[in-house]
Image: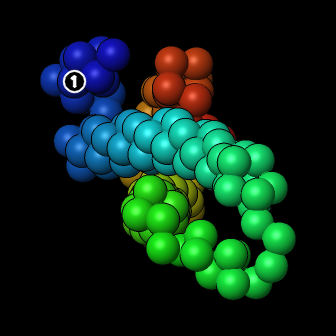
Amino acid sequence: MMDEFRRMVQKGELSGYTYDLLVKLKENKDKEQQLKHVRNIFGFVMLAIYFLALYYIYHHLLGSYTNLQQLTDLFANTFVVIGLFGIAVGSVAWKILNDKHDDADDDYNTLRAEMIDRSEELWGSELQGDHRTKVCRKLQKDYDINLFHK
């Protein structure tokens, strides 16, 4: 797809700077989508682990405890301590993934907004305006990148 835009640069229908911005925009979109995918899968896995841990603690451990002393013995169980530590580490990892996704999404949206704001500078004449429409439609169709509106 970017080969088509490269041909437009060679024909003079698209400036090299605009092409570079389009490539960077596509890279930012791909990075954002990849991080979103990883974050969502990791989030579902962590959610499943949370429910399994709650089920295990409630049905296998808490059901047999009747007083506070026995409940404190719960934390003497190595499996429980390791499990809680794993859940804590997984939660921190999910938060880091979420922050990375948010940063990538901000980078993508900032560049997209900049390209929309600078459309006169990037596309120039009415002749290139026709090429702008062609490029924007292609980006919208193939990559779900909207350069028509913010």
Q: x%, y% of residue 1?
A: 33, 16
Whether residue 16 is situated above or below residue 90 in the rendered picture: above
Pick the residue in front: 23 or 126.
Answer: 23
Q: Amino acid at mark 1?
A: Arg
Furthest residue toward left:
10
How would you rate the neighbour count of disc 1 (Cα within 10 Å): few for under 14, some for 14-19, many for 20 or more?
some
Residue bearing mark 1: 6
**Quarter where residue 96 is shown:** bottom left
Pick the residue in front: 12 or 77.
Answer: 77
Residue at 55% x, 40% y: name it. Answer: 45
Q: x%, y% of residue 67?
A: 80, 79
Residue at 50% x, 18% y: name it. Answer: 142
Going by the image, does 31 lie left or right of 50? left
Whether residue 134 is situated above or below residue 56 in the rendered picture: above
Note whether residue 86 is visible: yes
Residue at 58% x, 45% y: name it. Answer: 49
Residue at 48% x, 73% y: name it. Answer: 76
**Mark 1: secondary structure:** helix
Whether residue 67 is situated above or below residue 25 in the rendered picture: below
The colour style of the image is rainbow
Q: x%, y% of residue 33?
A: 47, 39
